[in-house]
């Protein structure tokens, strides 16, 4: 298993060219290993902390444990969150690259389910066909669930993806070799390979904002308060109240990934 990033010292001397050379070497090596045998190569590569982790003076990650609540009943599908996320996190503009996106579920009376997400919701949603047959329709914001038992972390052969002490799943771009194992392992479709950086991309809960005491950009811009961000374990926080007063569910709970995106007023048809 890769060493825990919590116990590993950051390599402060690492340069960008070192990083690129190293990544190329590891990618080649991994390719060779994959071709030679159907096993993962579990190297003992040191993992630097995330660029922002604990960087802000006075921020102590051990004092926090973050999650997000999503009230499906409040989401109007405006996708302001998707646009804000792309801007805040330099997510590629092209469709198919999203840290967060909006899916529209149309549940028919005969239990057929239609799901669409035009450009992650940014392009708006077309009129629903055959509206008389619809039992319920609603919008579901999706993102990385920052799982406590994340398969993406388990499969990463170089320890580039890891969980911070405050419960956020991050990717260290300096160590990611773009092998796609995490993309395939994530059961929520929450990862992609950045087309220019050639490293894994995903929601970071806007970690660079968290360490400055701010909420993620998607939460800040949501006009209806559909997204509630905060401490999972503390009492009397907005997220704690949300979880207390709603019958919250996680997505694909049977997979035991222990997600920390909590949904209220979800329909059982949502996957
Ligand atoms: Fe990893 Fe996917 Fe879970 Fe996010 S949702 S922590 S990318 S497995
Ligand atoms: Fe839904 Fe809020 Fe995102 Fe709009 S900004 S799509 S209401 S979560």
Image: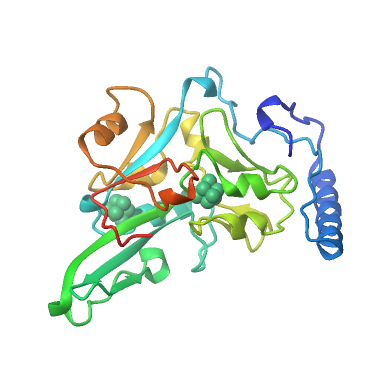
> Does 71 sit left or right of 99 as displayed?
left
Whether residue 191 appears in this view of the structure is yes
Looking at the rendered image, the quarter that the N terminus falls into is top right
Of residues 90 and 131, the one drawn nearer to the viewer in this rendering: 131
Residue 59 appears in the figure: no
Residue 157: percent from left, percent from top: 74, 48
Image position of 29 (left or right of 93): right
Closer-to-camera residue (36/178) = 36
> In the picture, residue 149 is in which quadrant?
top right
* 237 to 40, vertically: above or below: above
Q: Where is residue 125 in the image (x, y as percent from the top left)?
A: 29, 71
| Residue 78 locus on image (x, y percent) | 28, 59
Vertical placement of residue 1 versus 234, above or below: below
Q: In this view, does 97 lie above or below 227?
A: below
> How is this picture coloured?
rainbow
**Which residue is at a point 71% across and 42% down the rendered structure image?**
159
Going 81% across and 38% down the picture, which residue do you hit? 44
């Amino acid at each position: 298993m890769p060493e825990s990033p919590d116990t590993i010292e950051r390599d402060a001397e690492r340069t960008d060219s070192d990083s690129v050379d190293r990544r190329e070497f590891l990618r080649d090596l991994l390719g060779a290993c994959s071709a030679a045998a159907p096993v993962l190569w579990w190297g003992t590569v040191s993992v630097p902390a995330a660029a922002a982790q604990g960087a802000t003076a006075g921020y102590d990650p051990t004092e926090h444990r973050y999650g997000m609540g999503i009230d499906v009943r409040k989401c109007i599908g405006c996708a302001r969150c998707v646009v804000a996320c792309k801007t805040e996190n330099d997510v590629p503009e092209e469709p198919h690259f999203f840290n967060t996106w909006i899916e529209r579920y149309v549940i028919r009376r005969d239990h057929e389910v239609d799901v669409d997400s035009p450009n992650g919701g940014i392009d708006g949603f077309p009129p629903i066909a055959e509206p008389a047959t619809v039992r319920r329709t609603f919008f579901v914001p999706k993102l990385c669930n920052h799982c406590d038992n994340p398969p993406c972390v388990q499969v990463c052969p170089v320890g580039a993806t890891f969980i911070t002490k405050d419960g956020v799943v991050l990717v260290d771009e300096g160590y990611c070799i773009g092998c796609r194992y995490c993309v395939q392992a994530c059961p929520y479709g929450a990862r992609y390979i950045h087309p220019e950086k050639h490293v894994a991309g995903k929601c970071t809960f806007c970690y660079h904002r968290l360490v400055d005491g701010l909420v993620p950009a998607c939460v800040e811009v949501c006009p209806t308060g559909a997204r509630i961000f905060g401490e999972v374990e503390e009492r009397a926080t907005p997220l704690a109240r949300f979880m207390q007063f709603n019958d919250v569910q996680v997505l694909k709970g049977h997979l035991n990934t222990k997600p920390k995106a909590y949904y209220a007023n979800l329909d059982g048809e949502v996957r």
